Image (cartoon, rainbow, N blue to C red):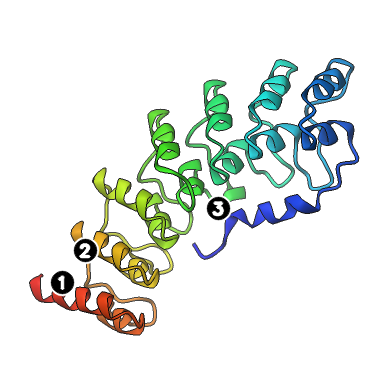
């Protein structure tokens, strides 16, 4: 879980837009993009980073460019050279409108592959995504309890990322709170690690278990004490007394 998948985005500012199609995308020159495609430029080409025009349009949530590409034969399931699907980058970037277009054109909302350690779009969106974006994925059939190779679910990703609005939404949907991921992560421990009393309070309100130990053998109370936050420590102590 500690691998930041969105590190892929760091590469974007270093792109060299020497290819006409990518230059048109960068400049949002939609008329030029359409002219190039009509005159034979391919939609299934890669830039120097192994990304496709469709991938770029989705990342930038450029729906005009995306629709031009689709009108000119772009394949919604054409992967970047690293095996990443456009819906994954769109979900990570919270590109609401672009991802909706992909889904309306038949993309699998639960797409997964080894290229993403079997994470699904909803997981990518759960770190920094909005409740509105997640609701849209769910309307198209996303699995709210999905887990990848690391065993992390969308809720745990939201808690880990201190995305409190989204974590609250997941709790309200009644998702499971009593699981432990591959590397020992659990809801109460990850909430404490955010050092955000509101996140800890939320986890306690929805009865996240307090009896787990982390891989180093530390209890929930030990982690609360180590957080350095008196309010978190007090909340955990009170919760342990009541349970």
88 or 63, nearer to the observer:
63
Q: Nearer the viewer, residue 197 or 137?
A: 197
What residue is drawn where x is 70% and y is 32%?
54
Q: Position of residue 235 (x, y in %)?
A: 20, 73
- State whether residue 115 is above or below residue 159: above
Q: Is residue 125 left or right of residue 200?
A: right
Q: Residue at x 22, y 73 (%)?
A: 211
The residue that mark 2 highlights is 204
| Residue 203, quarter of picture | bottom left
Viewer-nearest residue: 217 or 101: 101
How far apart marks 2 and 1 lie (CA) works out to 7 Å
Provide the secondary structure element on which disc 2 rests. Answer: helix
SS assignment at label 1? helix
Residue 6 in the figure: left or right of residue 231: right
Q: Quadrant of residue 98?
A: top right
| Residue 152 visible at all | no
Q: Give the residue number, with chain letter if any, for mark 3.
A: 117
Which residue lies at the image location 39% right of the left edge and 62% below the top edge? 181
Horizontally, residue 161 falls left or right of residue 212, namely right
What residue did someone put label 1 on? 239
State the separation of the CA atoms marked 1 and 3. 35 Å
Mark 1 crowdedness (10 Å alpha carbons): few <14, some 14-19, many ≥20:
some
Distance CA(mark 3)–CA(mark 2): 30 Å
Q: Earlier in the sequence, mark 3 or mark 2?
A: 3
Query: Contact (CB < 8 A) between labels 2 and 1?
Result: yes
Q: Nearer the viewer, mark 1 or mark 3?
A: 1
**Residue 118 in the image: x percent, y percent?**
52, 48
State which tag comes first along the sequence, 1 or 3.
3
Q: Position of residue 83 (x, y in %)?
A: 67, 44
């Amino acid at each position: 879980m500690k691998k930041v998948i969105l590190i892929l985005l760091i590469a974007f500012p270093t792109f060299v837009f020497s290819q006409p199609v990518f230059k048109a995308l960068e400049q949002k020159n939609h008329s030029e993009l359409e002219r190039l495609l009509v005159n034979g430029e391919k939609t299934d080409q890669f830039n120097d980073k192994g990304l496709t025009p469709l991938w770029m349009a989705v990342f930038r949530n450029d729906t005009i460019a995306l629709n031009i590409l689709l009108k000119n034969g772009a394949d919604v399931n054409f992967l970047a050279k690293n095996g990443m699907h456009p819906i994954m980058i769109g979900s990570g970037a919270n590109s609401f409108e672009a991802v909706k277009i992909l889904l309306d054109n038949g993309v699998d909302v639960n797409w997964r592959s080894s290229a993403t350690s079997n994470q699904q779009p909803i997981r990518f969106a759960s770190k920094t995504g909005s409740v509105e974006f997640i609701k849209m994925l769910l309307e198209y059939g996303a699995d709210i309890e999905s887990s990848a190779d690391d065993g992390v679910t969308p809720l745990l990703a939201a808690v880990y990322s201190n995305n409190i609005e989204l974590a609250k939404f997941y709790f309200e949907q009644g998702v499971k709170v009593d699981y432990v991921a591959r590397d020992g992560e659990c809801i109460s421990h990850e909430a404490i690690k955010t050092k955000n009393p509101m996140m800890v309070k939320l986890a306690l309100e929805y009865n996240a278990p307090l009896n787990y130990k982390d891989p180093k053998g530390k209890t929930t109370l030990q982690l609360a004490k180590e957080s350095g936050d008196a309010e978190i420590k007090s909340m955990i102590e009170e919760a342990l007394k009541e349970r």
